[in-house]
Image: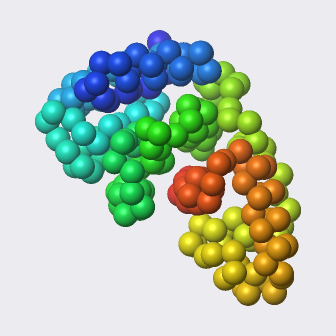
Amino acid sequence: MSAAILIVDDHPLVPMALGSMIEQHLTALRVIHAGNLRQARAAYQVEADLTATILDLRLPDTAGLEGLAELRALRPDVPVLVYTALESEPLRRNALSGGAAAVIGKTELPQVLIGAINEVLAASGDKTINGSSTPGRENAELSPRQRQIWQAVADGLSNQEIALRYGISLNTTKAHVREMLQRLGVRNRTEAATLYLRRARLRP
C-alpha cells in the first residue's frame, strides 16, 4: 500500500482542496481525511504507512495544542504539520516546541504547504515523494553572509541590528535581506524565520 498523508480538519472543503493539491504535486502520496481527533486516532491505529499529518488546531473534540500532543504521543514517528487560521508568533513557537514539524498559516500560499511537506518527508528519509517542491526552497544557494543574515532574521533582529552585528552598512544589509528572501522563495521576514526554525528542528 502506498504511503499516506492524513488531513485532520472538520471543515469539509479544506480537506478536499488540500487533498487535490497534494495529489497533484505529490502523486505518490495517498490522502486520507479525519474530521476530528477521534477519527485521527483511529487512522493512526490502522494506517501503518502513515507518513505525515496535517493538523488543524480547531476541532470539535479538542482545541489548541492538545491534539498535537496526543498525536505525537501516539506515533512519534509521524511528523505533524500544523495548518491553522490561528496565526501568532507565540502559537507558532509553542507548536514547534510541542513537536510540530512545521506551522503553516491558512493564509499562506499553497506552495508553502507543499514545500513544508516535501521538507519533512525528505528529512525523515521518505523516498516516495514525487518530485515537486517549492521553487528555490530545496536548493536555495545562499552566500555565507546571506546565511548569517538568515539566522539573524530568525533571531528577530532588525536590519539596523544586523548591520551592527556584522559591521556592514544598512543599505548592504537591506540588499542581502532582499536577495535572501528571493532565493528562499518566501515573501517576508516572518516566512524566512519560520523556514529557518523548521529546518533547524529537522536537522539531525
Q: Is residue 62 left or right of residue 112?
A: left
Residue at x 71%, y 45% (from the top left corner): 185
Residue 198 in the image: state x and y as whole percent.
55, 54
Q: Is residue 76 above or below residue 178?
A: above
Residue at x 60%, y 21% (from the top left corner): 26
Q: Is residue 123 above or below residue 52?
A: below
Residue at x 53%, y 22% (from the top left corner): 22
Q: Is residue 107 left or right of residue 161?
A: left
Q: Is residue 171 above or below residue 64?
A: below
Residue 119, by quadrant, is top right
Viewer-closest of 150 and 40 = 150
Q: How many marks?
A: 0
Residue 57 in the image: state x and y as whole percent.
29, 42
Q: Is residue 97 visible?
A: no
Q: Is residue 103 visible?
A: yes
Q: Is residue 163 above or below residue 128?
A: below
Residue at x 32%, y 37% (from the top left corner): 56
Q: Is residue 88 left or right of residue 46?
A: right
**Most distant residue in the top direction:** 1
**Most distant residue in the left direction:** 61
Residue 45, by quadrant, is top left
Viewer-closest of 185 and 72 = 185
Residue 134 in the image: state x and y as whole percent.
68, 35
